[in-house]
Image (tube, rainbow, N blue to C red):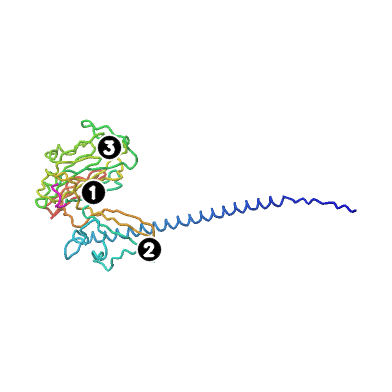
Amino acid sequence: MHKYRIKTIRYEEQGFASIVIALVLIIILGLLTVGFAQLARREQQNSLDKQLASQAYDAAESGVNDAYHDITTIDTSTGNDYINSTNVPSPNTCITPTSMPLLSPSADTYNSSINSQNGVSYTCLLVNLQPPNLLYDNVFPDTSRTVDFSTPATNARLHSLTFTWNTADAKTTVPPFPAGTGGFPPVSSWNSPAVLQISLTPLPATGLDRASLINNTFTAYLYPSNSSTPISYAQNNSAPQDQGLLVPSSCTAQGTCTGTITTIEGSPLSSIGEWYNLHIIDYYDESQNIIVTGKDTNNAAIQFIGQDQIDVTGKARYVLKRLQERVQPNTLPTLPNYALEAQDVCKRFSTYPAATTPDTSFPILVNCSSFTITSP
């Protein structure tokens, strides 16, 4: 009888471990590949977004330029700007080719589509001919802004102007208020929002002469303070010693200051809708924004005529850019040729409204020059 021996076969498990390691490596490599692909796609998308944002911004600027062209171009047949209250009755209505012939003085045609193949255009052009405020941005020290403005006939006479400005470089402390004739502190020790010099001159429709320009111009200094005290045009414009007064203007902890001039209806203007010249000079600190608002004698907010607001949205495919600009129209009153204002000018001059030959007998100052202004 034969006996058979049963052999036991043992399977090696080293191959299974290698398969697991290979699968783990494949998964890791796959995740890395997906991650790099996502990163490359994101960078590509960011690059595209930047390009589209630049195109949308350029499209919005094209809309601003179109509006600026017509705001500052006179229609010789009517004497008005091409954009005026007749063809733009509402600030909330988009200007379209059917609403008015933009760029009509030139050979250009109105077309908001900048690049139709790439979807670049400005989608809406708004022009507000009577904005609720006057706005100036990035006003640097020792620079000025000036505007001639009026108010709509729907408002009563102008009663007050409120000036709001904020520091551009985080200067939030309030300086001590100058006492007596001590004067302003030096620039080197200044760590506060700006001081604003405000000059307001009524421009009546008739009777405007050199004496009235001098006598009726109201000048005050809006000075940063912990509290605000409005100053009256009517009460502080009766004598030369009442000019150049300091006006305490309250400032917040964030460096935003507010000052007010009141009782402007006491000026020589005799009717609603006459014009004023406003001159603002910034001292000490850069003002990120200077905003001027006003109220009439009925305490109603006024709109301003003299600084048009352009609002344009540019579009490049799915990216939008919105721009707002302020421009001055052409239909403003013209100051007489003897009106002159200068700042930090080291010159000596004389005026002769009725003479044609200048007088050169006065001496030339050291490091300065002399000039003469004549008018017919």
Pick the front one: 270 or 351: 270
Mark carried by residue 134: 1
Three-letter amino acid code at the position of disc 2: Gly
Three-letter amino acid code at the position of disc 3: Cys
Nearer to us: label 2 or label 3: 2
Q: CA distance from mark 2 to mark 3?
A: 46 Å
Principal SS element in the magenta part?
loop
Q: Earlier in the sequence, mark 2 or mark 1?
A: 2
Report helix, strand or loop for mark 3: strand
The verdict on residue 153 being magenta is yes
Q: Report the side of 22 relative to 121 (left or right).
A: right
Nearer to us: label 2 or label 1: 2
**Residue 273 position in % (x across, y down):** 14, 51
Q: CA distance from mark 2 to mark 1?
A: 34 Å
Can the viewer see residue 346 in this picture? no
Residue underneath mark 3: 251
